[in-house]
Each structure stands twice: as C-alpha cells, then as structure tokens.
Amino acid sequence: MKIEAINEQLLRAIGVGVALLDRKSLRFSFRNDTFDDWFSNEAEPNQLQELFPDLDADAMQTALADNGRYASEIRFKKKRRTLIIALDFTSTKDDVLVLVCQNITRIKELESMIDSYSMMVERNTREIKREKEQVEKLLLNIMPRSVYEEYKTFGVVTPQLYNPVSVLMLDFVGFTEMVASQDPSVTVTELNDIYSAFDRIGEQFGCERIKTIGDAYITVAGLPDPTPDHAKAIANTAIRFVRYLNRRNLSHPHQWHCRVGLSSGSVVGSVVGIQKYVYDIFGPAVNLASRLQEFSEPMEISVQGEVAHVLKDQFDLENIGVRTIRGFGEQEVWRLSDSS
C-alpha cells in the first residue's frame, strides 16, 4: 500500500477532512472522503468560495501572506443537525494551499454545556450567598451578634449571666381594644413602624432589643457588652420613646400611648427552643421592669428606686412613694420625665 493511501486511511480514521487547493485560484485539486462526506451535495463545487460563501477570502489571503496560516470556523446543516467545522489553511512554497477540517461540534456542545453549568453554579452560589445573608440578618434581629457568632460556630449558646444591666419594658395602653376595633393590617403596619423607630433609637444609645410580645417591647442596656452607664442609656432611650410617640400622635389619626418601666439588676441570656428558637433574657431585672410599667400612667415612665438614685443628678425624677410590687415587696418608685 502506498504511503498516500495509508495517510488517507489514517485521516479518515481520525475524522479529519483534508483538501488541497491552488493558492491563487482557490480551486480544489484534492479532497479526501471525509471532506466530501461533510460537504458533498448535488452540485460539486470546484472553488473554495462556492463551497464556503461566507468565508472572508481577503482576510484569509492577508493572513497567509503574513504568517502562512489562517484559521476559521463554519456552521452548516447536515441531516437536521448543525455541524461546526474548524478550518485550518496552510500555505506551502509551491502555492499549494492545504485545508484541514476538523469536526468540533461535540467540543462546542461540551463547551456550551460547561458554560451553562458554570452559569448555573454561579447563579446557585449567588442565591446561596443571598439566602445565607438573609438568614444571618434574621438571626441578628433576634439575638446579639456575639451570641449569633457562638451559635454559628458551636450550634449551641451557653447561658450567660449579665450583671448589672438595665431593662426597659414598654406596653401600649388600650392595645386590645385597638386591635378589635381597627383593620388588623393597619394596626400591624403602624406597630411595625413604631418598633422600627424604637430599634433605631435604642441603637443610638447602645441598647439591644430582646424581643416584642404583641404590644410589649423589651430592650436592654449593658448586654452583651458591659456598659458602665447602662442606667443612663436606658433612661435616655425611654424618654425618646415617649417623645417619639408624642410627636407621632400629632400627625396620625391613630393615637398610641405607652407605659414604661425601668429597672437594673442581673439577667441570664440564652437561646431557648430547638426548632423555633429565640434569644431571651430572664431574671429579677426583667420581672421588676414588667411590674414597674404597671404603675405608670399613659405616656409615663416608672423607675426603680436604685436606678433613680443613680440618675437623679442628670434627669428630671419625681418620687411617687413606696409601692408594694408583686414578688419584690415594698419599694420606692420614681417617675422619670422629659425635661426638654
């Protein structure tokens, strides 16, 4: 078997189409079977541009003159399937142009699949990142960041004693009647606006909102990081809560009035629950703040005696006498006013 026949069989075996052309006229002088199988039709073309009308012949000649090579790709239909063929032209010294064609359809399909998969992975990664950020934001809304970091790292939160801290307990007057007499969606929307404003005010003074229970709002100063002026911070927060509601009531048809209780002492903070877990605090300071708000008149702030003695030189405080407080016996109660 001649070497030419062997080369022809090898080229057919590896699926490479080969053709020889005259460099000047671009007429075919040889085409192997693979080439003819790809590009054969009823009218056999004799010239390159007849076979590939979309090929840029000028660009090809320029590239061949510069470096002796030119590469391109073509797409065409073959038995209802689109084939992608890579064309590689090489110029020889005797003005013979060698055209080598490779079927890269499968490669392009795989590249397209890889690109699609990469885009899907990238999209899923973005979605996972966004969901992770949303989960983190949600958890940071229900627990302090240090507690969240501990929960994220270990999966549990160790109960922590905080002493001393100052607790604010706020409750709205007539909330039950308001819910029963008004559109629930309006009530919830307004409550959300008020709580959002409370959160911003508390954040200004370093307070950590612990939770809301319906119309009750609890925030703490001195947790999770110790704060020497926790009593002052909670007093400023309480005054601005009342000030905000007074100003809001001037321009809104629905009037919101609150009672506030302030106390200092120790609390224990931890995450409770397994499925619907929530960060919560327990202890004497929480219970006392809850009892004190019951002694308040609408839009007034009742303060524990010990807290009042700490604040009396900086705030407008009035002693309203000794009161019997359930679970705490008789204690001095003071009224904190906005002196501005």
Image (cartoon, rainbow, N blue to C red):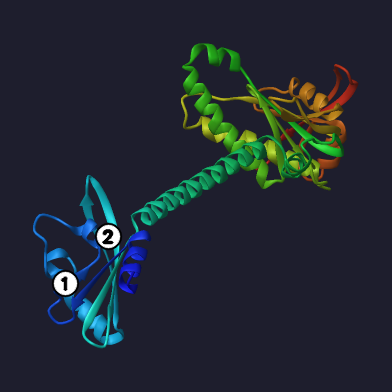
Q: Residue at x 81, y 33 (%)?
A: 269
* Secondary-structure class at tag 1: strand
Q: Residue at x 31, y 68 (%)?
A: 5
Amino acid type for the residue under numbered disc 1: Phe
> What's the mark number on residue 266?
none
Measured Cα–Cα span from mark 1 to mark 2: 15 Å
**Residue 273 in sight from this viewpoint:** yes
Q: Is residue 285 left or right of residue 61?
A: right
Q: Position of residue 285 (x, y in %)?
A: 83, 30
For residue 219, above or below residue 39: above
Quadrant position of residue 74: bottom left
Q: Residue at x 8, y 58 (%)?
A: 43
**Residue 263 in sight from this viewpoint:** no
Q: Residue at x 80, y 32 (%)?
A: 270
Q: Is residue 124 left or right of residue 111?
A: right
Q: Closer to the camera, 94 or 56?
A: 94
For residue 292, above or below residue 4: above
Q: Which residue is mark 1?
A: 28
> What's the mark number on residue 34?
2
Amino acid type for the residue under numbered disc 2: Thr
Query: Of marks 1 and 2, which one's residue comes earlier in the chain?
Result: 1
Using a 10 Å C-alpha cutoff, classify the residue at mark 1 as few (fewer than 14 neighbours), some (14 to 19) or many (20 or more). some
Q: Closer to the camera, 27 or 52?
A: 27
Q: Position of residue 111 (x, y in %)?
A: 41, 55
**Mark 1–mark 2 CB contact (< 8 Å):** no
Q: Closer to the camera, 124 or 83?
A: 83
* Secondary-structure class at tag 2: helix
